[in-house]
Image (tube, rainbow, N blue to C red):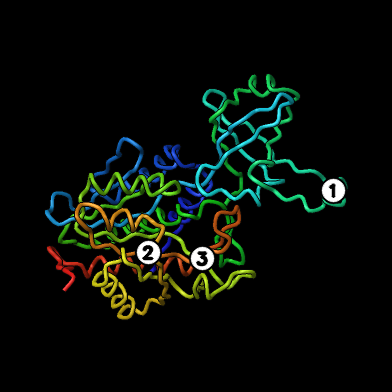
Amino acid sequence: MPILNQKSEQFLQKYLNNASPTGFESAGQKLWTAYLEPYVDEWHLDQYGTAYGVINPGQPYKVVIEGHADEISWFIHYISDDGFIHVIRNGGSDHIIAPSKRVNIHTRKNGIIRGVFGWPAIHTRHGEEAKLAPKINNIFIDVGASSKQDVLDMGIHIGAVVTFDDPLEIFNDTYYVGRALDNRMGGFCIAEVARLIHENKVKLPYSLYVVNAVQEEVGLRGAEMITQTIKPNVAIITDVTHDTYTPMIDKKKHGDVKCGRGPSVTYAPAVHNKLLELIMDTAEEKEIPLQFEASSRRTGTDTDAFAYSNGGIPSALISLPLRYMHTTVEMAHREDVENVIKLIYETLQKIESEHNFKYF
C-alpha cells in the first residue's frame, strides 16, 4: 500500500517550514486543519489552540491518535542599552547550538524582524577566554541596532518569540532534515492516517479523534486540557525518540534505537500493556519493523497526560527515531515516517467498538 504522495510531501514541506512556537501555534494549526479537513467529518479548536478532527462522530466509544504541534523557541527577556537582545527558553531550547544561527523575531505589529545569535570571534578568545562556552546567560541576538531605542523602534518587544530559520530538506532521498520535526512530524503522521482512512473508505466502529495538541514542550499542557474535553476510551500517542547510534550517546543510558529500523514502542507505567500488545501484534502481522524502549517512571510525552486523566485512559506511545533532537538539523528516516503512519493505521482497524482493555 503506498503511503505518501505528492500532496503529502507538499504539505509536509509547508507545515515544517512554518513557525509554530509553544504558545503561538496558531499559524501551524491553520495549515494542519486545512489539510486535515477533507478527511474528517468535523473539526474543532479548543481555547488554547489544540486542534482535532473527528471521523465517525457521535459514537459512545472514542479513540484518540495524537501528536503535538509546538516547537521549541525563545522569549525576548532583556534589551541592553547598546541594542543587544537577551533571551530565555520557551521549551527545551538548546543554548549550545545558538551562536551564529539566524533567527526570526515575531513581533506583535511589525511582523518578522531578522536577527542573528552573535558570538565573539575565535581570534579574540585566548587563555581562559578560550574556554568560553555558550550559556543561557551569555548568548545574545544582534539585529544591527545601535541602542535599545533602535530595537524598540523596530517593533521588537519584551516577550516577543524568537525561532530559528532552517527550512526542511531531504538528504540522499532518505532523510528529512530540519527544525521542528519534534513533533510536527507526529502531526503530519496522524493527518496521513486520517487521509488513508478516508481514501480507503475504512469504516471504524467508533469515533476517531485526530488530535494535534499544543504546549507539549512546556509540560504536556495541551494534552492535559484536551483529554478532559474529549474523555477518550483509548489514546495512541506519537512523538519522537533518540537515535542512539550517533557519536557521544551512551546506549546503556539512552537505549538501543536507530533511524531506519522502524518505529519504536515504549514499555512504561503509563503505557497500557494490553494496548501495547495489540500494537506489537499488529506490527508482527503486517510485517512492520519495530524497535523497543523502556522509560523509568514517565515517558516525558503526551502519553503521560492522557494515561493519567479521567480515571485512567489506556494509552500507548509510538515513537519516530530522530537524530539531533532540539537542534535545527533534526533528522528522520523516510521509511520510519511511513512505518509510523502504517502502524497507527493498521492498529486502528484492530480496535473494536467497546474494546476491552481491562488490566486482567
In the rendered image, the quadrant that contains the C terminus is bottom left
Three-letter amino acid code of the residue under disc 3 = His
At 68% from the left edge and 42% from the top edge, which residue is drawn? 139
Q: Earlier in the sequence, mark 1 or mark 3?
A: 1
Q: Is residue 169 left or right of residue 187?
A: right
At mark 2, the secondary structure is loop
Kindly identify which residue carries mark 2.
297
Three-letter amino acid code of the residue under disc 2 = Arg
Q: Earlier in the sequence, mark 2 or mark 3?
A: 3
Neighbours of disc 1 within 10 Å: few (<14), some (14-19), many (20+): few
Q: Nearer the viewer, mark 1 or mark 3?
A: 1
Q: Earlier in the sequence, mark 2 or mark 1?
A: 1
Q: Position of residue 259 (x, y in %)?
A: 52, 70
Q: Nearer the viewer, mark 2 or mark 1?
A: 2
At 38% from the left edge and 61% from the top edge, which residue is drawn? 298
Neighbours of disc 2 within 10 Å: few (<14), some (14-19), many (20+): few
Q: Nearer the viewer, residue 174 or 10?
A: 174
Three-letter amino acid code of the residue under disc 1 = Arg
Q: CA distance from mark 1 to mark 3?
A: 34 Å
Q: CA distance from mark 2 to mark 3?
A: 18 Å
Q: Residue furthest front?
A: 128
At 25% from the left edge and 65% from the top edge, which residue is drawn? 348
Say if 40 sits above or below 161 in the image. below
Say if 272 sits above or below 71 in the image. below
Disc 2, disc 3: CB below 8 Å? Answer: no
Specify the label residue 289 is tagged with: none
Q: Nearer the viewer, residue 9 or 301?
A: 301
Kindly identify which residue carries mark 3.
242
Kindly identify which residue carries mark 1.
125
